[in-house]
Amino acid sequence: MQDEIIRYENAGIHFGSKKVLSNFSLCIPKGKKILMKGKSGTGKSTLFKILLGFEQLSEGSVYYRGVPLSPRVAWQIRKDVAYVSQDTDLGEGPVRDLLEEVRSYRPNREKIAPEKLHILMQELELEKDILEKDFENLSGGEKQRIGILIALLLERDIFLLDEATSALDAGLKKKVAEHFLKHSHWTLFVISHDREWEKDGVEIVTIGSNGSD
C-alpha cells in the first residue's frame, strides 16, 4: 500500500500456554488515525511494545514502511515515533532536568526551543513552576501531561498513544484529543477508553480475548 507506515499480518500473542491474540491484521497508512479498543488483557499494549522492539510476536509478522521488523528496524522506529506509555514513571528529579535529558540526544537538540515549550505548556494547562518540581511528586494527571508534552516537543508525525489521556479531566481529554486529531498528516495509533478520541475520520479497531496486556 502506498505510504504504508505500520502493518501487522496475522499477528499472535501468547503468554505461556495462554493465547491472548490471534490472527490480528492491521495496515496503517500515513495520516491514518486508529483507535484501538478492547478489554484489559487483550494484548493492546503488547502490540505497541512489539513494534518498539520491547516484546516479540508469538506468531505472524510486523512491517514498518514495508520492511519486516528486526532489531535494527525497531531502533529506527524509536527514532521516528513518539510513544506515550500508560506507565507514567518517566524518571526522577526536576521536570526541567527530564526535558534536558530528552534534549541531550543529538536528534532532539534543535527541537526543544523555549518558545515552543511555553506554547505547549499553556495548551496543556501546565504552570511554569512545574519545571522546578520533582517529577515523582506530581499528580497522575500532571505526569501524563508531561509525557504528552515530551512527545509533542519531539516534532515527530507518528504517535503511539497508550491511554495517554486516562488521568485527565474531561476538558483536558477533549483538548488533547483535538490537538492530535487536527493534524491531517500525523499518523496516530491510539489505545484509549476515552470517547473524546471517537471522532469522524478515526477508525475504531476492537480486539478481544482473555489474558494479560
Image (cartoon, rainbow, N blue to C red):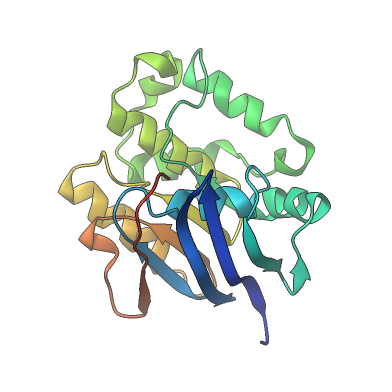
Q: Give the vertical position of 117 relative to 199 (above or below).
A: above
Q: Position of residue 133 (x, y in %)?
A: 40, 14
Count how many numbered circles sit on residues in the image.
0
Point 44% across, 71% down: residue: 33
Side (left or right) of 101 relative to 106: left
Residue 101 position by quadrant:
top right
Instruction: Tell which of 135 and 118 is nearer to you.
Output: 135
Question: Dividing the image into 4 quarters, which one contains the C terminus?
Answer: top left
Q: Is residue 76 left or right of residue 140?
A: right
Question: Residue at the spot x=56%, y=24% of the render?
Answer: 98
* 143 over 167 or under it: above or below: above
- Residue extending furthest front? 17
Tell me if residue 59 comes above or below residue 45 in the rendering.
Answer: below
Residue 181: x %, y % from top left: 39, 67
Q: Is residue 130 left or right of residue 189?
A: left
Front in this rendered view, residue 115 or 18: 18
- Image location (x, y in percent) of residue 186: 53, 68
Task: Give the residue at x 67% y 33%.
Answer: 103
**Image height of 26 relative to 59, above or below:** below
65 or 142, nearer to the observer: 65
Going by the picture, which residue comes out furthest to the bottom?
A: 1
Work out which quarter of the rendered image holds the N terminus and state it: bottom right
Residue 14 in the image: x percent, y percent? 53, 51
Furthest toward the left, the residue is 170
